[in-house]
Amino acid sequence: MASLAATHARPRTAHRPASGAGRSATVRVPSTQPLQRWAPRPRTPQEVLTLQRSAGNTAVQRALQPRTGPGVRDGEEVDVAMSGPGEPVALTDREVQRSSTSAAHVAVQRDAVDDVAVTIPRIQAPSSPAGTPDRIPPRVDTSVAVTVAGWHAPLLPVRFSVVGGGGSAGNLTINGAATADLTAGGTLLLRGTAQTAAGSGGGLRIAASIGTKQIALSAGFTVAAIPQNFSVTKNGPLTGAKRGVVANNSWESDSGSTADLDEVRRSEKVEYGTGTGMFAAGVAPTNSGYRQATSPPIQDSHGIPTAAITAPGAIAAQQVFVYKDDRTGVTDIPVRASGFLITRTVVAPSAGTLHITTEKTGTGGTAKGFTTTAGAGSISEPQAV
Amino acid sequence: MSTDGPGAPTSDDGIALFVVEGDVAVPAPPEDVEVARRYGASDDKGEVRDGHRITVLARASRYAVGDAVRVVHVYEAVDPRHTLYLMGPKPVWGERVDGALVTPAENPQLLYDGEIEHGPGVDFNWEITTYSFDAPGRHEIRWEIEGLTSNTLHVEVV
């Protein structure tokens, strides 16, 4: 106790609640008045505030380390009051309020949880195409930048946790654990550990809390893998009654495992541009129904009946893959990096001779209203007719 | 669309059929899907020729005058030599009602760009054709493409 006088011989601030939990007002205390050893004597309100930290009947320099126990409510630490020498009494909110005007109570300090502001952005993996509901994939980390403002010691750290996890909602870890504590803004690494069941999307949230008081809550999101990054390699030529090429189309899951795409279906859209020569009449767009997405590669055929190749001409078509996902509940979302340009060029190198070249090249574009970036790879098949 | 094997007339996501609205493929009405689902157990299929066959299906054999007779088309590759062209719904050609050609005689699609699978498998991804009759009587619907002839649908209009 001998050190108290020297320690307190400087301006200090006492926080006193104005009304209700977490609200505080600031009272300046004299800078020159040294603290005295506690003694059961009449006190002025100023003195009470000066002796803001107490343990039993003895003032101490700082007693804000405990974070649990009877002195803590809703993450806010509340001192004990002195109803008489050596008799600590836990304060109620009403007593806290009264303490500012009554010399009969030792003042309290409540840490201002409500002054802490936390922002949690949408929980959306960067691999999500436009139109995708908030989601993260399983197996890999998704970085989420959160902000924490107004935190100060001795508040409890801001604890980030998963709300709604488990069962059909799916689940995830935060920085590899169930919870993560921050005292300032930072990055959380969210990793899906169980995918959301079909039809149960959007039930997961990230909460930020101090003690039992929730500060912020994210929008709902889903753990769901989606396809991305289509690529093409050459399978072989079409011969006999047809000319063209068969391509191997492959894709990835943004989780790293296409087995995770078991609630995803894919469809392809093809739209033709204006043709020339023998293709001038144009070709109607086509598409496929939705098909499973767990077993790439698939074979794409790009053919024309040999008998139909009658004159020079050229035509190009844009191909775009789209997906539907029963976990997030979306349909017709363009797959990221799934665009290809399919071209056919018929030339007559000599009289009575026709050659056709069929090419497929990763190219971004739009087909039937669906737009994506370029897939990977390029194949070409030149053939005599 | 195809299935993992003959007799299961739905795609793996349970959507059995698509129809074209504008230039967009949308799931077919449930009644059509139900008709397609009968394919596996149906005794009335087209004759297998050279490892593949085509079949036409309808909801009923008796209709009232003016009712829509919706015809579902099925291509089945019984052996792996044949290819299933899964884009579509593809236009139907070579269909006859009471012997008269009522669709284009030849495949109107010059180009094919899209997914294929090798047989065995079933492709339901054809357009659904619709007919109605304005007088009572008996009618026959049959589909003929690329050397294959379907079963014959016998429709009685009352």
Image (cartoon, rainbow, N blue to C red):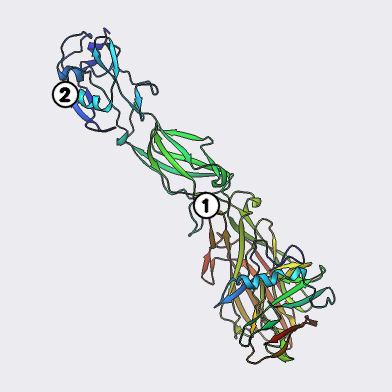
Give the SS element for disc 2.
loop
From the image, tell me which residue sits under label 2. A101
Answer above or below: position of A210 versus A45. Answer: below
Label 2 lies in what chain? A
Quadrant in the rendering for residue A215 = top left
Residue A301 in view, yes or no: no
- Whole-angstrom CA distance, mark 1 to mark 2, is 53 Å
Give the SS element for disc 1.
loop
In the foreground, A318 or B9: B9
Residue pictured at 21% horizontal, 8% vertical = A39
Q: Viewed as shown, does residue B94 lie left or right of A78? A: right
- Please provide percent x and percent y for residue A229: 59, 57
Quadrant in the rendering for residue A84 = top left
Q: Viewed as shown, does residue A351 lie left or right of A143? A: right
- Quadrant assignment for the N terminus of chain A: top left
Label 1 lies in what chain? A
Answer above or below: position of A316 versus B144. Answer: above
Mark 1 or mark 2: whose residue is earlier in sequence: 2
In the foreground, B132 or A358: B132
Rate crowding at label 2 as few (under 14), some (14 to 19) or many (20 or more) other CA atoms within 10 Å: some
| Residue type at the position of mark 1 | Gly
In the foreground, B18 or A282: B18
Rate crowding at label 1 as few (under 14), some (14 to 19) or many (20 or more) other CA atoms within 10 Å: many
From the image, tell me which residue sits under label 1. A201
